[in-house]
Image: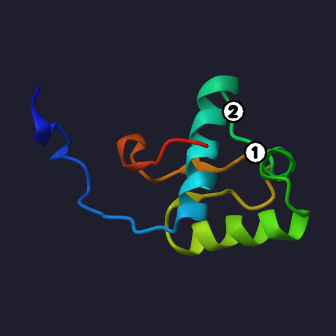
Amino acid sequence: MNQKSGAARSPIVHSFTEKQGQYLAFIYAYSRLFRRPPAEADMQRHFQVSPPSVHQMVLTLERAGMIRRQPGVARSIELLVAPQDLPILE
């Protein structure tokens, strides 16, 4: 296997906390499983946190350039971190 196969990809290195990594891993896993991004309510149920906590995390991930959303469009979270850079979802 060639380890440099991602060379054409942008060399952005994302640095995220353990909690941020878990949210990113959840977004990735949910999107793969259900073929659509999760709603904030889905993340709230999974992580057992309040709606404001989830929303704050989504805003943080967006500001950090790890996800992108379309304003006013439900379930529009797009992951900008390569799947191989994500931690395993716990």
Q: Which residue is mark 2?
A: 36
Residue at 69% across / 32% down in the picture? 36
**Horizontally, is 65 left or right of 59 in the view?**
left
Residue at 65% across / 57% down in the picture? 69
The picture places residue 56, in percent across and down from the top left corner, at: 75, 72
**Horizontally, is 49 left or right of 65 in the view?**
right
The colour scheme used here is rainbow
* 57 vs 33: above or below: below
Q: Quadrant of residue 30?
A: top right
The picture places residue 49, in percent across and down from the top left corner, at: 85, 60
Mark 1 or 2 closer to N-term? Answer: 2
Q: Seen from this angle, which residue lies furthest front? A: 90
Q: Secondary structure at mark 1?
A: loop
**Horizontally, is 11 left or right of 75 in the view?**
left
Specify the amino acid type for callout 1.
Answer: Arg
* 66 vs 88: above or below: below
**Which circle marks residue 83 in the picture?**
none
**Which circle marks residue 75 in the picture?**
1
Residue at 26% across / 56% down in the picture? 10
Q: CA distance from mark 1 to mark 2?
A: 7 Å
The picture places residue 86, in percent across and down from the top left corner, at: 44, 48
Residue at 58% across / 58% down in the picture? 68
Q: Quadrant of the N terminus?
A: top left
Tags 1 and 2 in contact by the CB under 8 Å rule?
A: yes
Of 86 and 13, nearer the camera is 86
Q: Secondary structure at mark 2?
A: loop
Mark 2 neighbour class, 10 Å CA radius: few under 14, some 14 to 19, many 20 or more: some
Mark 1 neighbour class, 10 Å CA radius: few under 14, some 14 to 19, many 20 or more: some
Specify the amino acid type for callout 2.
Answer: Arg
**Horizontally, is 72 left or right of 63 in the view?**
right
Of 10 and 48, nearer the camera is 48
